[in-house]
């Protein structure tokens, strides 16, 4: 069995009204039997961050906080270089923990220019659930989903639909395949992100995936999250999610 942690970056609002360019989901997969050891190693790394940067072990580490010195980071007044080091360290850690990660980036700006309809959140979750169906079927594992708080009703409905019907686009043509996600157990559970280190990792991964396709503006000093941050995941990137569509390993992008 795998525990699957999911968090989002961006929103579904219209870009013209101040909405984000994309709606992105980050997904972290932890094998259940290894969870206690992985959790202990993660706590040990958080102690290292406390010793080096003064960040409390229980402090919430989110992309937005690192970008803007916000939340618990405000009191430490860390430099951009230090915050970059924290972000990169959290990305590199994931391969050492033996976990996998992937992301789904729905490009709202491209949807707008092409006149493509649909709710970016629902589209992103449908792509994510399709990939999880393939992951569970291929590996013969079961999965339980844990996501950050918000829109629980929509997520529950989409997960039930995936388990019951599981319609997915075919990688080898224009048709569709009926692939019920029967190995996804029960309804997804919500968790406050400050209560879960793994949801926080999903948040960092989601923003890094967004920045991979939408680099930050050029600047003279160091960027906390550059377009190459996603690649710091190394072997933690779960490449099979887009092995047929191509592109950067571990990132599903729509529309192309």
Image (cartoon, helix red, strand yellow):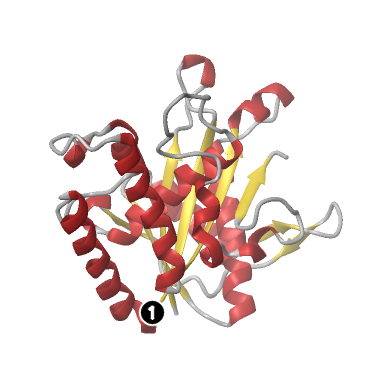
Q: For the N terminus, which image quadrant?
A: bottom left
Q: Is residue 82 above or below residue 159?
A: above
Compared across the picture, whether 44 is left or right of 162 comes to left
Q: Position of residue 43 (x, y in %)?
A: 23, 67
Q: Depth check: 134 or 57 in front?
A: 57
What residue is at 44 percent from the left and 46 percent from the top?
A: 154
Tell me the residue that label 1 is attached to: 32
How busy is the neighbourhood of tag 1: few (under 14 within 10 Å), some, or many (20 plus)? some
What residue is at 27 percent from the left and 35 percent from the top?
A: 79
Q: Depth check: 195 or 54 in front?
A: 54
Q: Position of residue 151 (x, y in %)?
A: 38, 44
Q: Position of residue 16 (x, y in %)?
A: 53, 15
What residue is at 63 percent from the left and 51 percent from the top?
A: 252
Question: Farthest residue in the front direction?
Answer: 220
Could you tell me if residue 165 is visible in this image? no
Compared across the picture, whether 214 is left or right of 30 comes to right
Compared across the picture, whether 200 is left or right of 121 comes to left
Q: Position of residue 193 (x, y in %)?
A: 27, 51
Could you tell me if residue 92 is visible in this image? yes
Q: Depth check: 86 or 148 in front?
A: 86
Question: Farthest residue in the right direction?
Answer: 173
Q: Is residue 19 above or below residue 99?
A: above
């Amino acid at each position: 069995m795998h525990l699957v942690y999911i968090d989002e970056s961006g929103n579904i609002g219209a870009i013209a009204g101040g909405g984000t360019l994309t709606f992105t989901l980050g997904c972290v997969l932890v094998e259940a039997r290894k969870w206690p050891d992985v959790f202990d190693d993660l706590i040990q790394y958080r102690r290292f961050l406390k010793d080096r940067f003064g960040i409390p072990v229980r402090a919430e580490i989110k992309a937005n906080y690192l970008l803007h010195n916000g939340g618990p980071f405000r009191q430490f007044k860390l430099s951009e270089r230090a915050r970059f080091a924290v972000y990169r360290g959290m990305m590199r850690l994931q391969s050492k923990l033996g976990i996998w990660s992937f992301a789904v980036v729905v490009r709202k700006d491209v949807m707008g220019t092409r006149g493509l309809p649909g709710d970016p959140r629902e589209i992103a979750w449908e792509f994510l659930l399709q990939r999880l169906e393939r992951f569970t079927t291929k590996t013969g594992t079961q999965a339980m989903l844990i996501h950050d708080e918000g829109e629980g009703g929509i997520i529950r409905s989409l997960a039930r639909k995936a388990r019951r019907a599981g319609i997915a686009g075919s990688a080898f043509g224009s048709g569709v395949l009926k692939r019920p996600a029967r190995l996804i157990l029960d309804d997804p559970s919500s968790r406050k992100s400050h209560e879960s280190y793994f949801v926080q990792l999903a948040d960092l991964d989601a923003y890094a995936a967004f920045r991979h396709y939408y680099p930050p503006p050029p600047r003279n000093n160091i960027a906390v999250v550059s377009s190459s941050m996603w690649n710091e995941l190394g072997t933690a990137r779960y490449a099979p999610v887009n092995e047929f569509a191509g592109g950067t390993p571990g990132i599903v992008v729509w529309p192309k």
